[in-house]
Image (cartoon, rainbow, N blue to C red):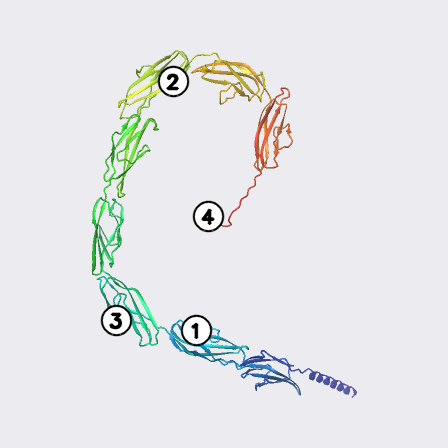
Amino acid sequence: MRTALRYFLVLSLIQFCFSASVIAQITADFNADVNSGCAPLEVHFTNLSSAGPGYSYRWDLGNGTISDAVNPQTIYLDEGVYAVSLTVTYGEDSETVVKEAFITVHQQPSVSFGLEGAEIGCVPFAVQLNNMTIDPEGGALSYTWSFGDGTRSSEVNPDHTYLIAGLFDVTLVAENEFGCVSTATVPGLVNAVKPQASFGVDASYSCDGILEVGFTNTSNARPGFTSSWNFGDGSGSTEPEPSHLYEAVGNYSVTLTVTDDIGCQASVTRANLIQVTKTRASFTTPKTVICPGENIRFTNTSTSADTYRWRFGDGTTSTAVSPQKNFRDPGEYEVWLIAGNGTCTDSVRQVITVEHVEALFDVGEDFYCELPAVVKYINQSVGADFYEWRFGSGTVSTQASPVQTIGEGFPFSDGNVVFSDTLVVYSSSGCSDTYVKQNAVTINMPKVAMTPAGSAAQLSGCVPMNITFSDKSTYNTTEDAIVSRMWSVNGGPWQEGSSINVNVVEAAKVPVVLRVITEKGCEHTNVEYINAGDKVNVDFNRVGNYERCASETVMFEITSPEPALRTSEVWDYGDETKPPFPVPFHNYEKTGVMNVSLTIFNNGCPTKVTKNNLLRILGPLATMEGKSDCNDPMLYNFTATVEEASSYQWDFGDGSPLVTNTLTPSHRYTSSGTYVVRFTAFNNNTGCQFSVVKEVYARQLNADFSLNAAYLCHGET
């Protein structure tokens, strides 16, 4: 029994505590998505109160709307300030919250407007709008006008000009400071009028010089409009659809002006609508005298024609507007043009002259066997006024019948040349013709020759000399031939024959002349010389000591014969060298005892003397080479050869220490430059030294380049 009582008391206490806790947790609260706005204002409320099973809600939204929804919504239709309350109930307990002036609804503007002045007018039609809009709350308003033609304005009382015709609705939108917007539209408030003038014709072209035209009025304007016509020829009409006679050739622009009942006006001009012409055939040419085969353009200048027929007088025709034509044969041609336009035709003619210009010539003589050759040209051209001669010899002339002289200095190949000459003739009208006479002039001269000749050994020697000369002349032509051969020795009398024997007993340079005479009377000569000399006493001495260092220049002195008897000299210095010039001094290129020879020519007669053991060349003797390393251009590798040297040294020319006792040194230069390298060899026994000098070009190469543009177009540099 006590246990049951104890359980009852505990359960009652727990139930009491739980009930007290629930009552203490009831809360009532809410908010809204908007608190102010323009009527009609839609508001959504959010319940922030206690929630759960057993809870109920009652809303008073202030506009007469009562709701039991958890999150109600409503629309406030009238302006004003509204209080909203919410009561939350759980069982017998409840909690209420009231929010005064929670919702504020503003009144929309009252929009009204009209026009100041007429509602109808001519384009451009200027109107002024009168804004009568009011804000019931007395606040400031902003405006947006739409004039119905695609334009807008934000002015209070705007002025607007209509540039297009039509019946336009005008709309005004007013907005107050709270964002409340009202709109008003007045349909067809503005009527902007713009008539359109247009017309047609029943005829617009004539090639007869006269044209009657009927005009059809197709204008679009208010009923009762009037018309004013300007026909372009100084006359006009006020009839709606007149007819008019054009009596003069010309192009006429027609203007129609229409005016409606309110004074709106429109005009249209159709430029050059009416064309009254009279068909006339005519044409021009750049010239009336032309050359055979020359293209000539006939430029059609006809009027009021659309068909053309040409007759060129050589049997050919054309229907082109402005044809191009060439005439192959000289002569006069009547060119006709017949121009037409329907039944209208006209014709015109012009004479075209095709000149006869022909180049032709001959030469007075076409074969010559000697120079100078005087060539006379015979001009046989027809219709020429100007001449241009181009001779095969390279000269030119503008004379009608020139004379060309080919002088003795003209270059020949084997005494034979054949010229082809050209004549170009021109007329005063510019026509030309060219004539080339192949092989017009031949110049062929015999080639006079004898044997022995030139540098033949028989022509040089010591007296007495006996030489037989034979004629070896040639003449390569069928137009002429050699008929006589004559000889003269040392200016003596002429002797005829194919050969001659000559004896020379005294030293001299003896000329032998051969003269040939051709069938056409041309004479040509050739001369050869006999170099006959005497034996002479030859002697020479060494200048200086018997023993000489290889680095020294050795001088020689010729003591016999006297200079007048020395035609030429040949030295053999004994060291197997061949000097380019026969001079009495020499730098030796080998060591040892030298046997020296001198040969002196008196005319063609040589006398030689040799002096054995004339001098001794002492060592040392040296050569030197140097090459750079391609992979290391500042590094040079040197090689030397020496004979009879006790010691040697290198001076590389850059201030570096001397290098000794090597024939193949390498040396690296530290900076780019040109250096003089000297290799010196010494002989302690002879006391001689020999130096070889060479320049080297040390360059520190750095490859680099730059561009003046990052991108280039094709063909740009």
Tag on residue 716?
4
Q: Nearer the viewer, residue 314 or 225?
A: 225
SS type, badge 4: loop
SS type, badge 1: strand
Residue 489 percent location from the top left of the image: 34, 15
* Residue 414 position by quadrant: top left
Q: Which numbered disc, 3 or 4, marks the residue closer to the eye?
A: 3
In the rendered image, which residue does mark 1 sit on?
Answer: 160
- First of labels 2, 3 by sequence position: 3
* Residue 282 position by quadrant: bottom left
- First of labels 1, 4 by sequence position: 1
Any part of residue 314 in sight: no
- Asked if residue 265 is positioned above or below residue 8 in the image, the reply reads above
Whole-angstrom CA distance, mark 3 to mark 1, is 40 Å
- First of labels 3, 4 by sequence position: 3
* Residue 215 position by quadrant: bottom left
Residue 633 percent location from the top left of the image: 58, 37
